[in-house]
Amino acid sequence: AQSVTQLDSQVPVFEEAPVELRCNYSSSVSVYLFWYVQYPNQGLQLLLKYLSGSTLVKGINGFEAEFNKSQTSFHLRKPSVHISDTAEYFCAVLSGLYNNNDMRFGAGTRLTVKP
Amino acid sequence: DGGITQSPKYLFRKEGQNVTLSCEQNLNHDAMYWYRQDPGQGLRLIYYSQIVNDFQKGDIAEGYSVSREKKESFPLTVTSAQKNPTAFYLCASSLSPRNRETQYFGPGTRLLVL
């Protein structure tokens, strides 16, 4: 079965600074990878996803992520963050073999953008 | 607007009481899911349904029950057998159960024990 590790539980950064949220996964088969964002007391919103093709994936709100198969990573990046990016971010992995019910989520990274 | 609605936003449960969380979607999605979210943890799957009148247990189904009588509705009942129900509950749906389909989430219901 696949699993996900988000390496940082909290990431504080100043406004307009770049940020990288790290995600590593383990799986013995091909995977699909997702990043979701959760604002306080709300559901999850899809930021971006990797299904196949180009390993650099661009999402909403200026975020992008790069799939690195050799390092089994899918790190999320943004070159310049805003106060409004303060939220919890979840990395998720889905095995290529199974149906959608086997999505595994990381524990989340809380991004705090300070003025 | 299409989307997923969950109600209520906050729910209080007394000892020994069953409570039901509502999840409705108007996206015409076949598959629906219930997750539980605890602080500092990722989401854990409680139940899922790939099609009407069918549902399967997820990783933490004990103390919960569901039904899927209509395509657009997937209510979750937290029974008295669930000894630690305090959590944030998220409902999701996807166009089909296929693993390439994106899961879309509702706004969540926070369940608290009195």
Image (spheres, rainbow, N blue to C red):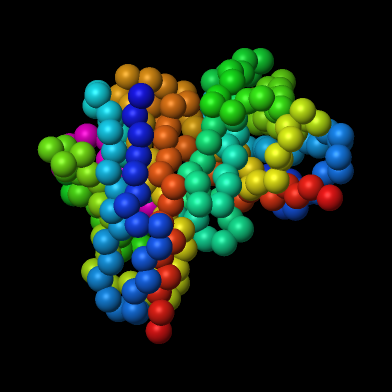
- Determine whether A115 is above or below A49 in the image: below
For the point 30% across and 78% down, the residue is: A16
Q: Nearer the viewer, residue B100 or B90?
A: B90
Say which quarter of the image contains residue B74.
top right
Say which quarter of the image contains residue A70.
top left
- Determine whether B112 is above or below B80 in the image: below
Q: Is residue B65 left or right of residue A14?
A: right
Q: Residue furthest front?
A: B83
Q: Residue furthest left?
A: A70
| Region of the chain picked out in magenta, as a range | A47-54
Q: Is residue A102 left or right of residue A23?
A: right
Numbered label tally: 0
| Residue B109: % across, % down | 68, 48
* Residue A53 inside the magenta-drawn segment: yes
Whether residue A47 is visible, yes or no, is: yes
Whether residue B28 is visible, yes or no, is: no
For the point 78% across and 35% down, the residue is: B20
- Determine whether B34 is above or below B110 in the image: above
* Residue B110 inside the magenta-drawn segment: no
| Residue A97: % across, % down | 32, 19
Q: Is residue A34 left or right of residue A70?
A: right
